[in-house]
Image (tube, rainbow, N blue to C red):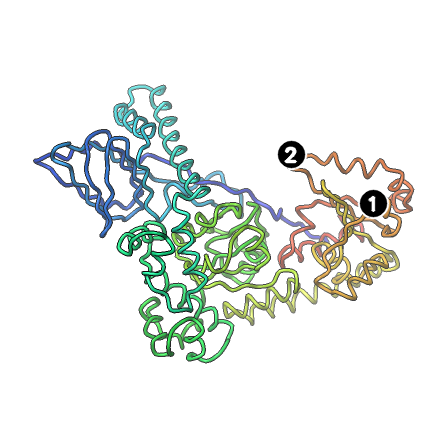
Amino acid sequence: MKNIVESEWAESHFPLYMADSIHSIYSTTNLPMYTFNDSLTVLIAVVGGKGNLMIDDQMYELMEGSVILLPAHTEAVLSANLQHPLHVYKLVINTRVQEGALLTGALIRKSEAASNVIIQFFPYEPAIVAHVEELYIHRLPDNEVRHVQNQIVFHQIILRLLEGQEAKYVASEQPSMERSITYLENHYSDKITREHLAEIAGVSQSYYSILFKEHTGFSPSEYLSRLRVHRAKELLISGSGTLREIAQKVGYKDEFYLSRRFKQQTGAAPSGYNRGYFKRVAVLLTPYASHLMLLGLEPAVIISDSSEYVSTSGLHPPETMMFIHANSSAEQVKSLLLDSNIELIIAASQHLDQYGLNAEHLRAVAPIVEISWMDIGWKEHLRIIAQIIQRRDRAEQWLAVFEEEEQAARLMVQDNGVANEIITILVIKPEALFVYGARNAGYVIYQSLGLQPPTRIKQQIEKLGDQFHSISIEVSELADYAGDRILVIVFPDVNGSTAHSEEIFKSNDWRKLSAVQQKGVHLLDRDEWIPYNPVSIRLQLQRAVSLFTGNQ
């Protein structure tokens, strides 16, 4: 049963920024108006004069030093103040994926400067304006030195834009507006008036609508409708009640009103929802992405604290999946998900809380299906996700084949005599020492192969099953958990160092262990043995057989 296994982990890449074109625009008495409607992101930098930019029913007042970033396909009309002729530069920004340098299974991260769906307005950013002007003046470089200087200037513009966006996300300029939106997200099933929302925000009703759209990209009524319809979708997926009951739960008086709103937003009736496959799904954290890939559906977006992604020869590598770092602000995550036209979000409430996200806030993007992470094991994760996307047969077929592999692997290991040994899984992290139970590497060792854990670990597995992850111990307790063999996994610190493990290995408590003296210690690669999803578990099973039979 010797297997050649590809690496499970691949790198993540951001896109490359490029200046697609740059133009100088004067608005005078002869040419008082200019219309923008580009297929790419446009940066408008005001060099001099005064004027207005109209986008739908919203007006932005422009003056020297103003900068505005228009998302792709945004129609806007620029008009000059005839007393102060307007001079602006139009910089068209493009991005390109690093195709040639990507490893198999690599993740592509979304461009935050060129893919934001919300208009970004900076009233006074003279440094950006000066950079854009310099770029225009030297738009036709006559030597390579100037060409490189242009590249630097262009990326200084991008850097300032990203820093400006980040500053807005970190410290909102309108906390009262945020409170009103949060109130709407938490009370969408109640009767809500624009008057009450404006009162919470401390502004007039008419101005509130303008601010709300600037903040979210939607009118208050559109936002409320999205919250209600997406919650209705969640209830339809889970089969929670009749249409009338669902309508009343989300804030509509009856099923007919729900159906009308549902059709307006989705183009289909609630009765037909989820009878077809979802195509654009976002997941929070890597394991759920692996479940989807196994079921033949590539996630459109993965929100994760790591750019690592499972990739094996048995799966088609991801092609268009976008990566959002889980430590991004809630507004950044929401904006990028909206831009990706997500139809469904799969997450665990534990992970939402961990990263400062919440279902109420993300529900305006798409319905959210929350799948418990710690209460159930990876097989149930797979079955639940398969049920949601209507691929149950595919999941059961894969599980049946895997269980046959488990039985064959168990026989091979049992014949080797390791069945009579006690196996300990010791995980050394910078902050603590752990003995693992029924999850991660413990699933394959104790459940797939049926090998014996230390007595105290066995008791916890029998009591908690898949919910028992690990137990923290002191170095002085090693003898109470050490078996005939010790499988050691070391987590590096933030600097990539594993020096902290040396304190364990040099201690008397470690050296006097029988497994250490009998050379029964195996150092395992964290990236190969920690991931907890079907694809990784299968690979770990292959590695475990090789480890215990000597066929490495």
Residue wearing tag 1:
521
Residue located at (84% from left, 35% from top): 506
Residue located at (46% from left, 55% from top): 300
Residue 253, percent from left and from top = 37, 77
Q: Is residue 159 left or right of residue 129?
A: right
User: For the residue carrying disc 2, how many other residues have a C-alpha within 10 Å: few (<14), some (14-19), or many (20+)?
Assistant: few
In the image, residue 55 sits, relative to residue 186, either above or below, namely above
Residue 363 figure quarter? bottom left
Q: Nearer the viewer, residue 262 or 387?
A: 262
Residue 150, percent from left and from top = 34, 25
Residue located at (88% from left, 42% from top): 509
Q: How far, Cα to Cα, is label 2 from label 1?
A: 26 Å
Earlier sequence position, callout 2 versus callout 1: 2
Residue 166, percent from left and from top = 44, 40
Residue 417, percent from left and from top = 87, 58
Q: Is residue 256 left or right of residue 452?
A: left
Is the Cβ of the residue at disc 2 closer than 8 Å to that at disc 1? no
Which type of secondary structure does the marked residue at label 2 adopt?
loop
Q: Name which residue type carries label 2.
A: Asn
In the image, residue 82 sits, relative to residue 410, either above or below, namely above
Q: Nearer the viewer, residue 341 or 252?
A: 252
Q: Nearer the viewer, residue 8 or 121?
A: 121
Residue wearing tag 2:
495
